[in-house]
Amino acid sequence: MLSSYNISHIKEGDYLFTTESGIVYSVYLLNDSIYFDEFPEFSEEVSTFGFDIISNPFRKTLFDPRVRITISNIIHNYLSVQQDKVLFFVCDSADARQRGRMKIFDQWYNFLKVDY
């Protein structure tokens, strides 16, 4: 069975990990109450989740199932401690690759089928 990569907890909500092939990922969970500032009754409980590749020695990102495992573990651990949080994922559109990001996120979500 595959396991998670070693995770470095940089600061509250910020994590890094490096794959076997040397790709470095950043995972972040941010308080984003600003998205719902018109709803103060729950806006403080809203967090966003995202991840980026911050260093890649290859031209193309290689498929690595341990990335999914590692990122899911970060989310699971966060929600285990922050049980009242609402977590949402925003697909960055700055590089016009938001559809690909959503497709990957949907695949991961359907594969994991975790209920909180």
Image (tube, grey):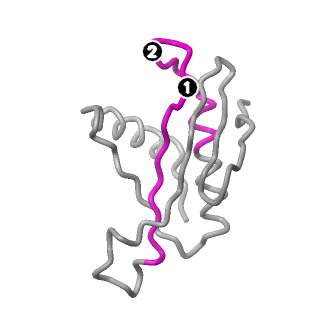
Taking the view exactly as shown, the residue that stands out farthest to the top is 59
In the rendered image, residue 88, in percent from the top left (x then y), is placed at: 41, 59
Q: CA distance from mark 1 to mark 2?
A: 12 Å
Q: Which residue is mark 1?
A: 55
Q: Nearer the viewer, residue 111 or 37?
A: 37
Q: Amino acid at mark 2?
A: Lys
At 32% from the left and 68% from the top, the residue drawn is: 35
- Residue 65 is situated, as x and y percent measured from the top left of the image, at 59, 28
Q: Which mark is residue 45?
A: none
Front: mark 1 or 2: 1
Q: Quadrant of residue 102?
A: top left
Q: Is residue 91 magenta?
A: no
Quadrant in which residue 1 is drawn: top right
Q: Residue at x 66, y 36 (%)?
A: 17
Residue 78 pos. (x, y %): 62, 60
Question: Which residue is at a point 45% across and 15% down the rendered structure image?
Answer: 60
Give the extent of the magenta segment.
44-71
In this rendering, the answer to whether 13 lies above or below 19 is below
Q: Are marks 1 and 2 in contact (CB under 8 Å)?
A: no
Secondary element type, mark 1: strand
